[in-house]
Image (spheres, coloured by chain):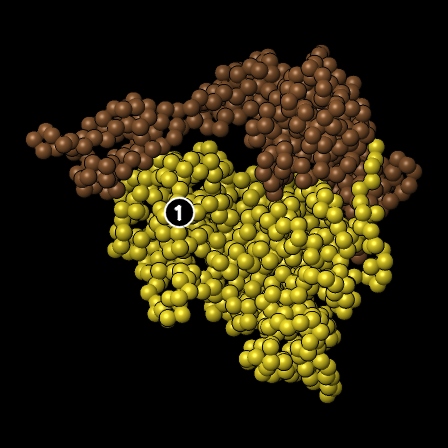
Amino acid sequence: MASAYTPGLRVTAEAQIVRERRLPLQGEVLVSEGDRVAADSIVARTALPGRVFALNAAGKLNIVESDLPSMMQVTQGAKVTEGDVLAETPGILGLFRSRLVAPVDGTVESISAATGRVMVQASPLPVEVQAYVDGEVVEVWPSEGCVVRTQGALCQGIFGVGGETRGRILVVAGRGEVVTERHFGSESMQGAVAVGGALLTFEGFQAARQAGVRAIVAGALDYQDIARVVGRQVGVAVTGGERLGITLVLTEGFGRIEMARRTFKLLESLEGDVAAVNGATQIRAGVVRPEIIVPSRSSSVELQTTHHSRLDVGSRVRVIRTPNFGKLGHVTELPVQSRRMPSESSVRVCVVQLDSGDSVTVPRANVELFGE
Amino acid sequence: MSDPSSIGRPALDWSRVRSVLATDCGSTTTKAILIERQPDGTFCLTARGEAPTTVEAPFEDVTHGVRNAALEVQELCGRRLVREEGEDGCAPQDWLLRPQTAEGGVDAYISTSSAGGGLQMVAMGVVSSMSTDSALRAALGAGAVVMDAFSIDDGRPPHQKIERIRQLRPDMVVMAGGVDGGTQRHVLQLAEIVSAASPKPRLGSSYSLPVVYAGNQDCRTEVERILADKVTVISERNVRPTLEEEDLLPARERIHDLFLEHVMRQAPGYPQLIELADAQIVPTPGAVGHLIRSVAEERKQNVLGVDIGGATTDVFSVFGGRFNRTVSANLGMSYSVNNVLVEAGFENVVRWLPFDCEQVELRNRVGNKMIRPTTVPVDLVDLQIEQAIAREALRLALKQHKEFAVELRGIQTDRTISDAFRQSHRSRSLIRMNDLDLVIGSGGVLSHAPRRVQAMRILIDAFLPQGFTEIAVDSIFMMPHLGALAAHHPEAAAQVFERDCLVRLGTCIAPVGRARIGAPCLRVLIEAERRTHSFECAVGELRVVALPLGEFATVQVTPTRRFDLGNGFGTSVQKKVGGGVVGMVFDTRGRPKPWLNGSGRLERLRQWSRACEEYPEGHEDAIQNPQDAGMPLYG
């Protein structure tokens, strides 16, 4: 076989980047195709249904369920405000009346003579979606959202936590350094996207958060510190919803691993520029990787999307498992027949000429395309 | 299983089929196998290929992955299966050469699928241990991943249930509750909760979420009325018509039909896949379950099947004719590998490693596997770590299965005085390890273990079978394919299953009991092919006796008075045992709690490995310091 399919992370100085901006439920899209938007522009909004209160009306009024409709003071679908009387018993000679009142502003969803319950839904909660990156609206999905396109640098990480944020890139450490609290002493770090390091310590992360850093991009972290960062054990890599006040992006993984030279050089070259950062990671079907996007200052160059997922002879790859973890090279051969590894596993392989000059045989599953 | 011809291509005359291409579209990989009729008229596997599944962007069409996997089969078998685009003026979707001719092609194409998360469902019932369990069993039996189960008595207030249902966005809901003629009020409360949540389907914003109502038939109309504007209600026979009876088949089949007719049609490329296939697409676990049931019925045995995947582990069992399936949603070997470590704990994983390992090192390695889930172990240290995790994933999955596969609850039973003193409200599990006849393992870590004995050790260590238990594995992960084929060509499926799929590893012989390590445990007499062999086993041993495939032996085992092999403590047992690629494994490590921890653990693990020839000779010397094989700094 002359080629194979393999995943890869993108680290590139200039790319055309499109991001879907989708509402969680149908709503209103506020932009049109062709509009220029800033990262903080609101492009769509909706209202999430409010909390539902299931009121045991029959129990509260001390009546049988089938009598409930006749006791209701409001009808299904009625708007109510907190404290409004929803149902009332006639009492005895007008005395000893029992009342059911609305616990919240909202709408009467249902009145059931079978279960004796009244459902009141609280007022909707407004939700707005921002553009996330400076760019152009290239597609609009009526009632659902839009697609924003930008041009610029894209750096995908391997794992992250925390949601979307923005800030100016600030290199705080070399790519081989251990990042500790001493790297985050300066007040100028407020609102920054801090970059650097082979290993971010938990103390370093805490210091960054206290210094008001919006995001940290580091090579790696000890896995057991993830639980301390997030406040819970992360069993499966589905993240992004954490409210930490800071977003974390790891470019390499867990353990002490230097940030890849190319990644570091790219981010270093962008120091001072505003980056959009998202730590959301989903390593499941529909894989989502964390990312750092820095839109270009000029947008005159039209780029084609050149992201391939095909492994061919000549492909630039990175080894992503021991041994040779992290080394870069070019594919020189894609043998058809399986080969036996030291573990005695028989797998399909590729032969990679490493940048060091060595030629190694690696399972195809253990390389990723290194997008350049 | 439903009529295969109702969807897709015109009905095929399966009796004339000479070759079948079968695929399983998994979350990450699409696996294709080619089955061909041989000159003697029997069917066998002739090639296997795989390619990444292409449900996601940028492809968003599952048939690309199917085509790529078929191309790999074509390359390996040297026979043409795939047309080039536009060749012979054919439409692009007609890329698969059919029927079989002298130039190539196949007569039939079938597929199973769990891509894009498979069938994701929510189960609902009135009482968690009764109707909700029945709804769960119906959903699981149809091959679903159950995202959550709701009951009136689950302790969550209604608003929490409503919020949760809104968040989940399942493909389908199955709702049960009440026996026929029984409670209506609580069933209607459930319907009100669903109505208030107004759940939206995961795929496709334009279609209405299907809700299968299989509860008290007396309130069917009222349930349909409450839910009318919010979801599509499909009423089916009650899964629990009486307390003593569970009737899952109608609901299960309805779920399966709805999956094909509604859910699958929303997934990227599935309309094309349905058109391409000669039979209905079957959810992967549904196909495996079908095959396990067939094996149990045919052999009249109690069977435990397990499929350990990347994200989930499915356990199937047939005990006393009763089928059960559970999905442990976050126990798996790639996406969920780290969760196994979290749930099992470091101590439980490391107890299987024949070397010392720092906690931080192990957690980092496992974390790195989680974030690069498709990578495979190259060195022995990584392999042993993955196999240790597999043991724990399987152990936890079986524990969950045992808790779920119980006798029907809610039935009035006679309680003895001892029951009353125990104050136990839990039903008896159907899974009794000393009644288990056959274990079938499937999934990459078992099917692709470099040595078959490694798969046997993983299954024995994880499940701790008792007495005499045959162990087998799916050779290259093709049970889903054969499960789907069995519905249309049972003869071909059975032949390929026996010949190419089922690898008989051997028989585990393990007495129940415990004594100090080194104390006498078993006296064994084996008679095979006019040869006899006798020996004694002490407590704490693993001993392998080769018995090749196709051979049989009469094994007489006499346990000491602290041990029981099924006939009582100290009573001997004689059985006829079939051979396997590993042979007979005498396991005297003790049951139900074996000797695993404590002083001398490392040496014992190494002894067991040596006794089984589990790893290459001299491997222990290579692994004096696993950190040496760790991750170097790089740049």
Camera-nearest residue between B156 and B63: B156
What colour denotes chain B? yellow
| Residue B119 in view here | yes
Please tell me how crowded label 1 is: few (under 14), some (14-19), or many (20+) other residues with Cα within 10 Å. Answer: some
Drawn side of residue A105 relative to residue B573, left or right: left
Give percent across and percent down for residue B344: 61, 51
Camera-nearest residue between B466 and A47: B466
Q: Report the quarter where the C terminus of chain B lies.
A: top right
Give percent across and percent down for residue A284: 61, 40
What colour denotes chain A? brown
The residue positioned 63% from the left and 80% from the top of the image is B559
Q: Quadrant of residue B37?
A: bottom right
Q: Chain of mark 1?
A: B
Element at label 1: loop
Give percent across and percent down for residue B305: 57, 62
Give percent across and percent down for residue B333: 65, 50
Circle 1 residue? B154
Residue lying at the far right of the rendered structure: A357
Residue lying at the far left of the rendered structure: A93
The residue positioned 33% from the left and 26% from the top of the image is A104
The residue positioned 58% from the left and 67% from the top of the image is B592
Q: Amino acid at mark 1?
A: Asp
Q: Measured along the vertical axis of the image, is residue B569 above or below residue A326? A: below
